[in-house]
Amino acid sequence: APIVHALGATHPLALAPVTAPPASVDGFVREFLHNLNFELGVSLSASSVNDRYLALAQTVRDYLMARWLDDQRRLSEIKPKTVCYLSAEYLLGRQLDNNLLAARLTDVATEALAACGVSLEELREIEVEPGLGNGGLGRLAACFIDSLATMSVPSIGYGIRYEYGIFRQTFVDGQQVEQPDSWLRLGSPWEFPHPEAAQTISFGGHTEKYVDDDGVERSRWIPGWNVLAVPYNYMVPGYHNGRVNTLRLWRAVATSSFDLRVFNSGDYEEAVRAQTYAENISKVLYPEDSTPQGKELRLQQQYFFVAASISDFLENVLGDGVELEKLPSRVIFQLNDTHPVIAVPELMRVLLDERRLDWDDAWAITQQCFAYTCHTLLPEALEVWSVDLLGRLLPRHLEIIYRINEEFLEAVRERFGDDEMRIRNMSIIGEHPYRSVRMAYLATVAGAKVNGVAELHSQLLRDKVLPDFDEFYPGKFTNVTNGVTPRRFIRLANPDLASLITEALGAGWTIDLERLRGLEAYAEDPEFRAKFAAVKASNKRRLSDVLHVRDGFDVSEDHMLDVMVKRLHEYKRQMLKVLHIVTEYEGIASGRVAASAVQPRTFVFGAKAAPGYIMAKRIIHLINAVGKVVNEDPRVEGRLKVLFPPNYNVTLAERLIPAADLSEQISLAGKEASGTGNMKFALNGALTVGTDDGANVEIRQLVGDDNFFLFGMTEPEVEALWAKGYRPADFYQQDDDLRRAIDLIASGAFSDGDRSVFEPIVSNLLYDDRFMVLADYSSYIAAQAQVDAAYADQDAWTRSAILNIARCGFFSSDRSMRDYIDRIWHTPPVL
Ligand code: F58
């Protein structure tokens, strides 16, 4: 019998708090060696680097454990209102350093490991980051849970424990080739599986009507098949506040592992078919969804994790005896984009079918328990599910969605009369090109609040994407501008800058980023500027070392470092950056410009293309092709360099951003919802060349026009040009530089004379150009000339860089969290 049973659950031993090991070098050494010997089963002398890393991670966990368990116990007693952040993605980045920092263990660990003859640096480098996200949206979720823990806000992050995260990108002949990301292969020391707490999640089958004991007609779901959702818990330590929140990711496990009878008959494939099918649900992040099977898998993933999360919250967090009417005072489910929106009919189903509430009560509760964040403006990115698929996979949920829609449209009719056009536009069910459920509409109808992620985005969301809803629900729409965590993106990524700031302002800025304002005065101090410039230079050397080992690249300290890192998408306009580079190159190659006259620059790209996005992959190919020619042409005299390290991820971002001089944020106005890379660069003292888009608008307002290189059309100008009729070829005809750049690409200069290779890119630019690259080209080139001129005055540039940092404290994700708490969640910290 377990000891607690034998003693009784109230025995002092069972209640005794867990204690952390002594936070001394000695204590750390002991714990580390204990873990190495007894958990990993190796002696120090026989251990591999990976063994040591795993033992170190376990040691850090041991220090955090007492706090984690204590927080869980305390919260289960206090029962505060809790944020349940529902997100299909968490792009966490490496854990070791962050957890050492949060627990104030970095120095002790460094010393303790040194005493064991082990280098912390070496162990750091072996950690494989959990890449459980695609880009900004997933990284935002990771920043938010960091801030919530640091601010002592009761919250749980819920998501999926993908066995394979975002693919590992390699280049073969300059073209992207995807490799599976087996991030769990060498062990996963940060997770705690709880197979005993698995939830059963159902799919398929049919519904039937029946009359319950009270004579009420009800519907019930007779599912066709099940999977188990097994929770894996991760610690989310707050920074220096002794708090540890939980991230709970679900793994799909088959309810029965295989059919022994079939196995014994020798049909091994058939014996495991059901298991494989079920376990595919958490196999891979964002499976290619161009096939019907891929689409179905995506919907399975979405329902799988939200159903498990809701059930987990109601059964394990809420506690017994809570009246469901009070649910909204205990929880807010924040929907990170439309991916978790199937949670809305799921909560309705639980309240109606399992808890036997009537419709109106269930709906009143549901409408207070959800809020929805939209992260896009691209119409094609607004998720829809075919009624056919949804009805097959989740028949009861489809019924519920229909009823929500019926009642909603009834209310719209009451308010606006039988305006059929309006009804059709607002219906949660779309009819063209096929019957489908519009998930953003469902989220808007169900959510207590709907927010965009930057001022401009929220404005456009209201005015352009969901205007009828804004009219129907006054006050429902709001804005929360994104933010980034200063712990990871300044303190950890840029330790020398962090020290310099602390030297000037004291240590409080890490949790109160507006204090960076204090640096404004230092921008005027030549000595401080010199120190800042030295930090930048040293970050470039550090980056050069990293890229040298990683990819064989070298970064020269006296080049301007011009960086564009983000997902490859046409709307983000990496193509515009390519045209700038080709223009610079063409000037030199043609002899019209002396190489010695150009400002030495290294252009760095980092970008993954979705595996099925052909045009994005072509652009990657072109960047690599241009890079090869430019880097190898002796006429350039090494003054222009193009580097494209493959497999851009959080770990590489942490090296690149602190070294950057120039941040490229050049999306077509009205397309980038916010951007968060833009904030990370500005906070690390890079100047931005950018359009009036997303959060660039707010960055520029804060840093001032003198410290920002603005170019391009505004969103209304973009609209006006579309309305007038956009003809990209006219821009090509009228601009000599543009024509020469495009002609050079078309000529095969970057494809060994083969004109066909990049022809699709060229004709797309000339005859389609959905994102108006050509329309903004001349303005961009002019802005880049200003960049060159400004960079020539290094001291003035440095001053601007410091002012960027000083004025961007607003972009801390702590501030974003405060805004969510004030405007949407109403969940005060529990100190
Ligand atoms: C991004 N969206 C926005 N989506 O593009 C960016 O402007 C914003 O700053 C960021 O969200 C955070 O709000 C984004 O990253 C995705 O990654 C999708 C995930 C699902 C598959 C398709 C891409």
Image (cartoon, helix red, strand yellow):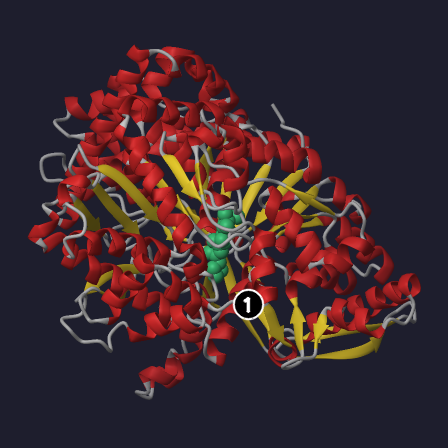
Residue type for callout 1? Glu
Total numbered labels placed on residues in the image: 1
Instruction: Determine which quarter of the picture holds residue 302.
Output: bottom right
Figure check: 506 above or below 733: above
> Looking at the image, which residue is at 16% across and 47% down?
550
Q: Nearer the viewer, residue 39 or 757?
A: 757
Q: Is residue 772 visible?
A: yes
Quadrant housing residue 78: top right
Q: Nearer the viewer, residue 675 or 582?
A: 582
Few, some or many residues within 10 Å of mark 1 (<14, 14–19, 20+): few
Which sits in the foreground, 256 or 773?
Answer: 773
Question: Residue extending furthest left?
Answer: 634
In which quadrant is the C terminus drawn? top right
Q: Which residue is mark 1?
A: 380
Left or right of 42? Residue 461 is right
Give the image location of residue 503, x and y in percent. Answer: 35, 12
Question: Residue drawn at (36%, 56%), measured in percent from left and top?
Answer: 576
Q: Quadrant of residue 623?
A: bottom left
- Does the residue tagged 1 have its C-beta within 8 Å of any atom of ligand 1? no
The location of residue 313, given as percent across then percent down, is: 63, 48
**In x, y percent, where is residue 781?**
35, 48
Residue 284 in sight in this render: no
Determine whether the residue tagged by mark 1 lies in a helix, strand or loop: helix
Give above or below for 90 relative to 764.
above
Give x and y (percent) for residue 163: 37, 59
- Taking the spot 66% from the left edge, 35% from the top edge, the residue there is 821
Nearer to me, 559 or 71: 559
On screen, residue 787 versus residue 253, left or right, reads: left
Vertical placement of 41 versus 389: above or below? above
